[in-house]
Image (tube, rainbow, N blue to C red):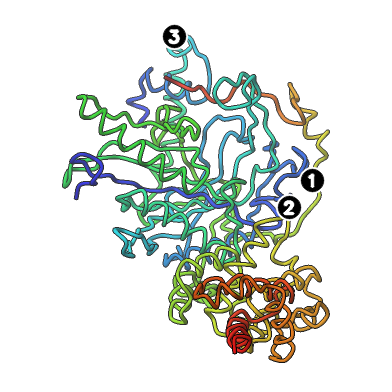
Amino acid sequence: MTTPWLDGYELVVGLEVHVELTTQTKMWCGCATTFGDEPNTNVCPVCSGQPGALPVPNRQAVHDATLLGLALGGSISPRCRFHRKNYFYPDLAKNYQISQYDVPLVLDGRLEVEVERDGELVTEVVGIERLHMEEDTGKSLHLGATGRLHGADRSAIDYNRSGVPLLEIVSHPDIRDPETAQAYLRELQAIVRTLGVSDARMEEGSMRCDANVSVRRPGAELGTRCEIKNLNSVRSLGRAIRFEALRQVQVLEDGGAIVMETRHWDEEAGVTRTLRRKETVTDYRYFPDPDLVEMTTTPEAVERVRAELPELPAVTRARLAATGVPRAQAATILAGGMLTLLDDAVAAGAAAPAVANWLAGEVTGHVSAGDATLEGTGLTGAHLAELVAMVDEGALSSTMAKQVLAGVFESAGTKGPRAVAAEGGLEQIGDDAALGAVIDEVVAANADTVAAVRGGNEKAIGALVGQVMRATQGRADPKRTNELLQRAIAAADG
Amino acid sequence: MSSGALSEDEVRHVATLARLALDDAEITALTPQLAAILSYAEQVGEVAADDVEPMTHPLGLIDVYRDDVRTPGLSADDVLAAAPDPQVGRFGVPRIVEEGA
């Protein structure tokens, strides 16, 4: 099938996603994996590649990799091992990266993603060839006039990241458009976060993505691919694929040939540029690392890990949709790690759509606006259920409910909505007599407006409702106020 | 790579991968030496039979792991003591990436 915007060609994309595990320590040694520490402070003889230092695999990292492999529907290799991938690069202190080669830990997974196409939600299946374990490299800082890669005359290496457990997830070239690539990356991120094996922050590099992009005439053999690096966001991935596909079609249409190479995505310029010609596979001279022994996994061990799998995002989404939570809100709640709050509030008796509305609206707004974290708000499912109940009972107007929620945040969750409302006198005036007194005052003080309403200008009553709301600091029920105002005006008339 | 077929070009390729600058005389001298080393190693092929599993480790150990517990490492000063050109707490190195046309 041709890609509509590719002039008779079909786009073919495969993704390689790297995920840093959030273990306490590195893959082969007991150094901390903390992000953002002072350079070269989490380094030991093993991760700085000193002669004679011996790597020992991190049990937790192997467990986490197995868990993710199972979440992706993969099969766990009963026996696997580590290889040395040899190449010279200063961010690699040993001159080789320990990785997996012939037998990775996980084979044959798949990921179902939802893509919106012509306003409809379509499910696409992307096959996963393998998931293997390896180690991250040191981090380079490019010194120079511009401080960027281009034009840097010196580089400087921090080995804190060297040896951090890294998973590489390689998809089949099943992806046919940028939207599916983006959905795949987002879904993988959601799964990894649900499992708690990585924070998968693209901006911090704990999740990274390379795209193998090629184009071909429909039905033809796969075209020569280029690997695109430096994709730092889901948005960059989509933009880069689109640019690269158009570039390749242009080269072919001009009678040229695509050269297999690695290209660098320049986010600012919106273009890909040649980074280096691809070294062939044999140039890495992979061989089994003699410092490491085989890893075995029994079927029983696989089942024990499988039993730990939590509800995966696709299942959660279906469950939320069934309870009437809009898709966009469900996505916000999942991305914000607020599912437990939602589930707890529902368990405490609230309706899911009402709770979802608060979480995706006010709560998300509060957390993303300032320095607040979700944990820092002290918000619980019980608080949310209480808030929803108060609104349902008519004890709070929606405006007041927002103030009450802000009060809960202010108390860091030590006070619930009922306590905040009682202390602040925020409850809605449910008493017609109390409201009627305010209304009489407003009617008396606004003779002109009252006359306008009486003269047939029904919209003018809105100004009077506003006066009542102001006089009660928003504690009046606008609908009831409107009714009582009409009655009062009619009565004054007679 | 079979020793019988080891060419000077293959030696040049291996030297490039190992970042060794060898001149033509050295390549000519090293090619038969490397061929001899390879043919020595190939003697293993004479005893390796189909019924023998390839061995990746001489001790026959499997499943050696460590728990995910922090252990002390080196101080940044010790780490950088071996750096020929320390730069802002890091190892200064020649510019890493050659950006092409």
Q: State how far apart marks 2 and 3 are (Cα).
A: 47 Å
Q: Is residue A130 above or below residue A227?
A: below
Say which residue appears at 36% left-offset and 54% top-offset.
A180
Same chain, marks 2 and 3?
no
Label 1–label 2 contact, CB within 8 A: yes
Q: For mark 3, what is the residue?
A: B24
Q: In this view, does B40 lie above or below A217?
A: above
User: What is the three-letter code of the residue carrying label 2?
Assistant: Gly
Which subunit holds the residue at mark 2?
A
Estimate how packed mark 1 is, as few (under 14), some (14 to 19) or many (20 or more) residues with alpha carbons within 10 Å. Answer: some
Label 3–label 1 contact, CB within 8 A: no
Q: For mark 2, what is the residue?
A: A30
Secondary structure of residue under mark 1: loop
Residue B67 in the figure: left or right of residue B62 = right
Mark on residue A148?
Answer: none
- How many marks the image carries: the answer is 3
Estimate how packed mark 2 is, as few (under 14), some (14 to 19) or many (20 or more) residues with alpha carbons within 10 Å. Answer: many
Is residue B95 among what the camera can see? yes
Is residue A347 among what the camera can see? no
First in residue order: circle 3 vs circle 1: 3
Which subunit holds the residue at mark 3?
B
